[in-house]
Every structure is written in structure tokens, then in C-alpha cells.
Image (cartoon, helix red, strand yellow):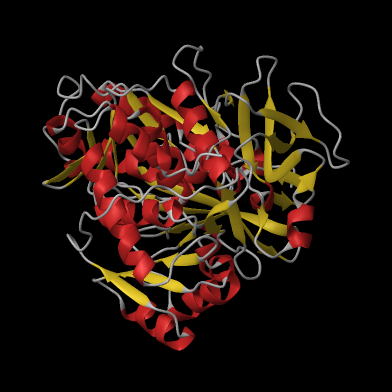
Amino acid sequence: MTNAASLIWDRAEQTPDALALREGDRSWTYAQLRSGIRGAMAQLGDHGVGPGARVLVVVPTSAEFVLTYHAVLALGATAVTVNPLCTTRELAHFVDDAGCTVALGWHEGADAVTTTAQSAGVPLWILEPGCVLPDGDAEPAEVASDDAAVLLYTSGTTGAPKGAVLTHGNLLACGAALASALDLSPQDRMGTALPLFHVFGQAAVMFTAYTVGGSLSLQRPFDPGAMLRMAVDQRLTGIAGVPTMWNAMLHVDTDVTAEDLSELRLASSGGAALPLEVAKAFRERFGAVVLDGYGLSETAGASTFNRAIHPRKEMSVGRALPGSRLAILDEDRNELPPGEVGEVAIDGPFVMREYWNKPEATAAVRHGDWFLTGDIGRMDDDGDLWIVDRKKDLVIRGGYNVYPREVEEVLYGHPDILEAAVIGVPDERLGEEIAAVITPQPGRSIDPTELRIWLEERVAAYKVPRIYQLVEALPKGATGKILKRAIDRGDIATTGERPARATTPTT
């Protein structure tokens, strides 16, 4: 089986002078990128990294991440990629749970990883720009298709985070499937500010770009105006981001126009549901259609994607990627017909091998060949998928099922709302009450009573939030995804504003 890092070696042989990587004013051809990875392999080898080792990678989006990450894989080791903002307690869990024997940190904000490495007694390599030097003629180690390549820890909404084991086969399948679905070629120039430790940037973007021999341009930290300018200056054909990034670019004060972005043919969104109003407005302002897809850490960030060759169906996340299949299952794990709502299940070559050292947790998300996502969705006769909501986000108000995403889609159509999150909060009478946490557009004000009246004209009465809280910003994760679990539901239940109803709902 081909080592996933061999993509770089193959392209270095076929097109050695083609542009592979850009960060700021630094750039690498494929031949230079391979030389840099070889240099990182030598340095990691000096730290004792070899086949089967697990390496904690606490490094932000950077060229050095790309170099050392591929070096870990090329050595036959496993990269345990985590958020550089993790605390010492969190990092200690990853080191202990994964059995990491080496840690990589970044020269900025290295206190937590340094303390963790010292406490665990593992070697630490602190990276900084330019620290990886070209060296040697090493070749990627031989691996099996189901050998672990990456260990990605899930968000851990309940209990400690679980490590999803992605194999070399998973990563290669993800890149190949997305490259095919998006019709990418060596001439494509992708750009992103996504964190590469996360599955979206790492697997769905980086591996896809290198599968076809295209180039990857990196930005850190994300800056909406600078991202648009980078797209113009580097003639990017594709940008990848999460919905909050598209929303920020949509509202940024910039002189970049649709004409300036004439080469941008692929605007790829993932990581969370893309509000329809944001996609429409982005196209109107910049002329680019934002296509979104659906995937999880457990599926290498891949499952479905909209294709330009298929008619676009509003709010659909597209069809199953090549080589995979989808199903909608009821509570008894029976497949449901088109149009019925149930749990989304996936079968394909990018589904994880297992949760690391957690056989019971692995068994809980398996049903035969199916991976059970925990998401609620429906499919039509063409196989297009709609994600109705997260199973865990479902609000049951007085016996009525309310899917927050549906209400959020409506809220994003309000001209004074920048961001919105709809959640369930404890309620003694109904079990749960619906709350809307909202960030207004800059310079705008929102009256909760008027907003409730506005919503009552657009959604069924039982779906209208009864509690409203205005905030300067919603909590977000490293990718920019809104983190509903970080919202204090108890506080909102007691302090949120409860405007009087304008109509008389049944409950």
C-alpha cells in the first residue's frame, strides 16, 4: 500500500518545478517540498521517531506544519494533531491516551506543550519558521492500507475526547474522491486559512490539493480582507473555509470585486451548515458560488459534496462522494425511503478504522458496514442529502421536535443579524425551551420583541424562540465553527429576555 506522504514524492518526480506550497512570501516547488520533508524526517529520526510511533503535533497552520506532518507519515508514524490553544491538562490527556513518544510545538505559545512534554518525559522539538532544512534522500516507509496515519481527537461533547484513527487508505481515498467530485487538476491553486490540525484543512483541503498536484496557499490568522486580496494576488482558483469565514468575507470592507476574482471557480465550505442567505449574498457580491459538503473527523472530512455538473438544490450538501454510499436509518436501524427523516449513515473508504483504544465506543457507531453519524437528515430520489440537524442539538419542547438549524436559516435572513445560534435550555414545564443567541450586524440594534414578531410570520409557532440574548460574539472553535456547547444554557434560561408573544401558539 502507498504511504499517504508518497503523493509529494510522486509529484516531485513528475512535476518537480511546479508550485506546491505558499505561505506569505515563502514558496516551495514539489521538489523543494520533498527535500524539506526529508530534512524533517532526519530530525524526527534523531528524536526517536520511527514506524508505529505516535507524535503529538501542537503546531498552527504553517509551512512547518506541512513539512513535519508529512515527515511523520513518511516515517510510518502516526501524527496526533491537536489545537495549539489546548491547555496543559488537555495535552496531557492526548499524550497519555495516544501513548505519544515525541512532541512538536511552535515557538509562539509553547508553554503548555513544553510543560506537558517535560511532565511526560518525552522529547520536544520546538518549530519556528525556517527550522526545517533540506536533507537526505529518504523514501516513505512501506505501510498497509489500514495502518494508522493520523489520530484526530473529537470535540468531546460528553466525557473525554475520543481519538478517531484515520489510516493511510482513508487519507488517500478522501483526496481522490474530493478531487474527482470537484474536477480538480494540477492547474488549480487552492487557498485556505483553516487550521491544518483539523480534519477539514488537513484531509479535505491539503490532501486533495496534493492528490492532483496543485498548489496550496496558507494564511494565518484568518483575515477576511487579506484572504480576498490573497485570492486576487495569487490568482487562486479555489478557497476553502467554514461558514463564519464566508460571512466575514461577505461583510468586510474591501475594494476586491467580482471581476478581480474571475479565476476563483471553487469556493468550498464545510465544518458546519452554511446559511443559505450567506451563500446567496456572497455570490451576489463576489460572483462565486459557494459549494458545501458534509463530513466528520471520523470520515476524514469527506462524505458528500455538491457538484457543479448537478443542478444545485437549496440547502442540500450534495451526493455521496465516489466510492461511498449513504442511507437514512430509523431508530431500529432500518433504511428509510427518500423524503423520510432519520439518522445519516455512511459507508466508504474514508470511514475511520476505530476510536483509539475504545472498542465499545467504536461498536456504538457501527451497524454492519454503516458508520452512524449522529446527524439527522433526509435524501431525495437523486441521492442528494439534506442535514436537518445534529441529533444531539435536537430540542424537544413540550413534545414537539424543533431542529435548530431550520430556525437559524430564517434568522440569517434578517438584515440586522450577523450570527445566530438556536439552542434548547432547561424548562420545568416543557422540559426544554427554545433560545436564540444573536450577534447583531455592526452598528445595528435588535429589539427581541420585534424579532419574535418577525419570526412568527415565518415559522410555525412552536418553533419560535421564546428566549433571546444579544451578544457581541458567539463562542467559536479553532475552525471558526460556532460552539453551541460553550454557551451557558443555565445562564440564558435565567437572564435571557422573554418578549411577549404576538400570536397565540398552541404550546
| Rendering coords of residue 297 (x, y %) | 55, 49
Residue 60 seen = no
| Rendering coords of residue 178 (x, y %) | 48, 29
Please tell me in which quadrant of the rendered image residue 321 appears: top right
Q: Quadrant of the N terminus?
A: top right
Total marks shown come to 0
| Rendering coords of residue 443 (x, y %) | 24, 49
Frontmost residue, 465 versus 92? 92
Image-based side of 139 in relation to 126, left or right: right
Q: Residue at x 16, y 32 (%)?
A: 234
Seen from this angle, which residue lies furthest front? 137
Seen from this angle, which residue lies furthest bottom? 119
Frontmost residue, 44 versus 170? 44
Image-based side of 206 in relation to 425, left or right: left
Relative to residue 73, is residue 309 depicted above or below? Answer: above
Frontmost residue, 448 versus 465? 465
| Rendering coords of residue 460 (x, y %) | 65, 35
Frontmost residue, 324 versus 440? 324
Image-based side of 506 in relation to 272, left or right: right
Q: Residue at x 52, y 47 (%)?
A: 142
Relative to residue 431, is residue 190 depicted above or below? Answer: above
Q: Residue at x 47, y 11 (%)?
A: 309
Residue 109 seen = yes
